[in-house]
Image (tube, helix red, strand yellow):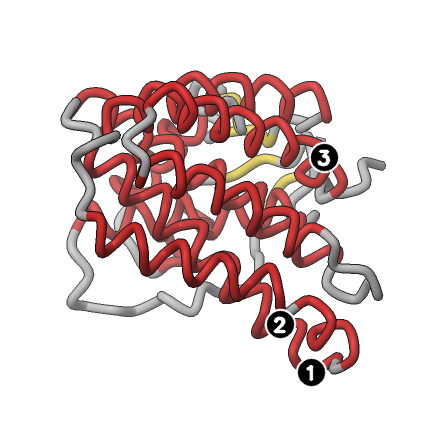
């Protein structure tokens, strides 16, 4: 079993203004990114002392970050040995998406009627334009990264708005707990596909988001939940493609 003693330094290292909770989040985000981008392999050990040196933090937020990663099924904690990276498979992605679908569909139903129409109309306009710009993106390679970043930002904005507007603090809290995992899957998948000539997922995803927003504008909770379910199901195959090759 390999042992991690040093990995790439985090850009968030040595930020004295970062509070305890933010430090834990920084560790979780960076380790998730390392795992899903293949920089940390299944079976590698995550040693608290080494991670504390990497992130320039005390051991406490490191331990809490590893507990959080264990809670979402990404590492296994071994007594007195730190943690071990789990192998993440396409089945794991499918099961994560099943959980996400249940949470997000419940949230969008509850959020229906609680979001300002002007905000929804602005989002609808953004998604319509994202769906129409694919030809320009395909012709101009320099626009690919910008288009992906815009798509990510809009995706996060919509899902955060729904979670914040659902009126159920327990559901909102659970979505917040899981969203780092959801978004790391998403971002890793896009990063591995960025150099491909086809970016059909961009307009496809924009149409899926638009259907959710239009259902919310119509105050149709059932239609919003159906649109959300379709959106999450269609993302499974893309997220699975983003998994690192296991050796």
Image coordinates of residue 90 in percent, x first then y, are 72, 26
User: Residue 119 location in percent, x, y?
Assistant: 24, 55
Q: Mark 2 points at which residue?
A: 145
Q: How crowded is mark 2: few (under 14 residues within 10 Å), some or many (20 or more)?
A: some
Tell me the residue that label 1 is attached to. Answer: 142
Q: Is residue 225 above or below residue 164?
A: above
Q: For the residues labelled 2 and 1, say whether their Cβ atoms are less than 8 Å apart.
A: yes
Residue 56 figure quarter: bottom left
Picture quarter with the N terminus: top right
Task: From the viewer's side, name the closer residue of 25 and 40.
Answer: 25
| Above or below, comparing residue 185 to residue 53 in the picture | above
Secondary element type, mark 2: helix
In the rendered image, residue 115, in percent from the top left (x then y), is placed at 20, 42
User: Mark 3 and mark 1: span between their CA atoms?
Assistant: 26 Å
Q: How far apart are labels 2 and 3 at the CA level? A: 21 Å
Residue at 33% x, 30% y is 175
* Disc 3, SS: helix
Residue at the outermost front position: 218
Which residue: 66% across, 28% down? 88
The residue at the point 58 percent across, 35 percent down is: 45
Quadrant in which the C terminus is drawn: top right
Q: Can residue 39 be seen? A: no
Image depth: mark 3 or mark 1 in front: 1
Q: Residues within 10 Å of mark 3 (few under 14, many from 20)?
A: many
User: What residue is disc 3 on?
Assistant: 240
- Left or right, 172 with reference to 75: left
Query: Residue 182: horizontal and vertical position, in percent?
Result: 49, 37
Looking at the image, residue 152 sits to the left or right of residue 61; the answer is right
């Amino acid at each position: 079993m390999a042992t991690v003693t040093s990995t790439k330094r985090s850009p968030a290292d040595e930020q004295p203004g970062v509070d305890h909770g933010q430090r834990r989040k920084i560790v979780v985000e960076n380790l998730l990114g390392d795992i899903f981008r293949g920089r940390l392999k299944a079976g590698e050990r995550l040693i608290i002392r080494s991670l504390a040196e990497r992130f320039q933090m005390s051991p406490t937020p490191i331990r809490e970050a590893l507990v959080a990663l264990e809670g979402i099924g990404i590492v296994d904690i071994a007594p007195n040995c730190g943690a071990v990276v789990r192998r993440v498979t396409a089945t794991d992605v499918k099961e994560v998406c099943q959980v996400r679908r249940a949470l997000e569909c419940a949230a969008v139903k509850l959020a229906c009627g609680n979001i300002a129409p002007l905000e929804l109309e602005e989002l609808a306009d953004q998604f319509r334009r994202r769906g129409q710009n694919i030809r320009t993106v395909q012709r101009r390679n320099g626009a690919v990264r910008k288009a992906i970043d815009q798509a990510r930002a809009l995706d996060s904005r919509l899902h955060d708005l729904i979670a914040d507007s659902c009126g159920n603090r327990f559901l909102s809290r659970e979505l917040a707990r899981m969203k780092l995992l959801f978004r790391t899957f998403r971002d890793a998948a896009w990063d591995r596909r960025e150099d491909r000539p086809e970016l059909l997922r961009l307009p496809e995803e924009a149409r899926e988001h638009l259907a959710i927003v239009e259902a919310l504008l119509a105050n149709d909770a059932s239609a919003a939940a159906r649109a959300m379910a379709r959106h999450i199901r269609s993302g499974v195959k893309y997220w699975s493609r983003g998994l690192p090759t296991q050796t």
